[in-house]
Image (cartoon, rainbow, N blue to C red):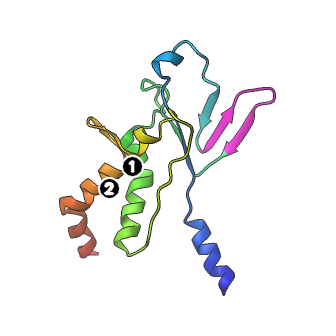
Amino acid sequence: SHSGCYWRMATNVKVAVRVRPFLPRENGEECVISMQDQTTTVKGNPAKSFTFDHSYWSHDAADTNYATQEIVHRDLGEPILESALQGYNNCLVAYGQTGSGKSHSVLGYDEEPGIIPRILGSLFSGRVQKEHVAH
């Protein structure tokens, strides 16, 4: 049925949020976000909590829950690549205000590539094509 088709499509949408480290101008400020598993909480009176498919804590690299570029890619990039290799269209949208970390997550930097360079690296390395053909 048509409604069954819509349900399958709707379940393929994933929403992820990521907290970036403070910028130099923000050092000394209080972080008003906390994350536990898939729940992101904004401190306040009252505090407000939101649940997402993924909540990535990338605020403090020393924290045991720190989400590296590799973790973000594993959770978001690899499924996009696998889906594309199966012939499905995919879209990655990064939304947020200027300076919120979109470019870092999606593109990354030389020493910490983001989702797109990692997907392209896997795609063109030949590794993915060999694994996909074997399936």
Q: Residue at x 58, y 72 (%)?
A: 9
**Residue position for label 2:** 119
The three-letter code of the residue at mark 1 reads: His
Mark 2 belongs to which amino acid? Ile
Q: Is residue 43 magenta?
A: yes
Residue at the spot x=47%, y=41% of the render? 102
| Residue lying furthest right | 46
Q: Cβ–Cβ below 8 Å for labels 1 and 2?
A: yes
Real-space Cα distance between discs 1 and 2?
8 Å
Q: Across the whole image, how many numbered discs are drawn on residues?
A: 2
Image coords of residue 110 (percent x, y): 26, 37
Q: Position of residue 21 (x, y in %)?
A: 48, 26
Say if 62 sits above or below 127 in the image: above
Instruction: Left or right? Give the position of 1 relative to 113.
Output: right
* Quadrant that contains the C terminus: bottom left
Residue 88: image location, x then y, percent:
43, 73
Q: Which quarter of the figure has residue 79?
A: bottom left
Q: Which mark, by number, is residue 59?
A: none
Q: Is residue 127 left or right of residue 14?
A: left
122 with respect to 69 (left or right): left
- Residue at 61% in and 68% down: 10
Where residue 4 sits, quadrant-wise, is bottom right
Q: Secondary structure at mark 2?
A: helix
Q: Is residue 23 magenta?
A: no
Image depth: mark 1 or mark 2 in front: 2
Q: Which residues are magenta?
A: 38-50
Label 1 vs 2, first from the N-terminus: 1
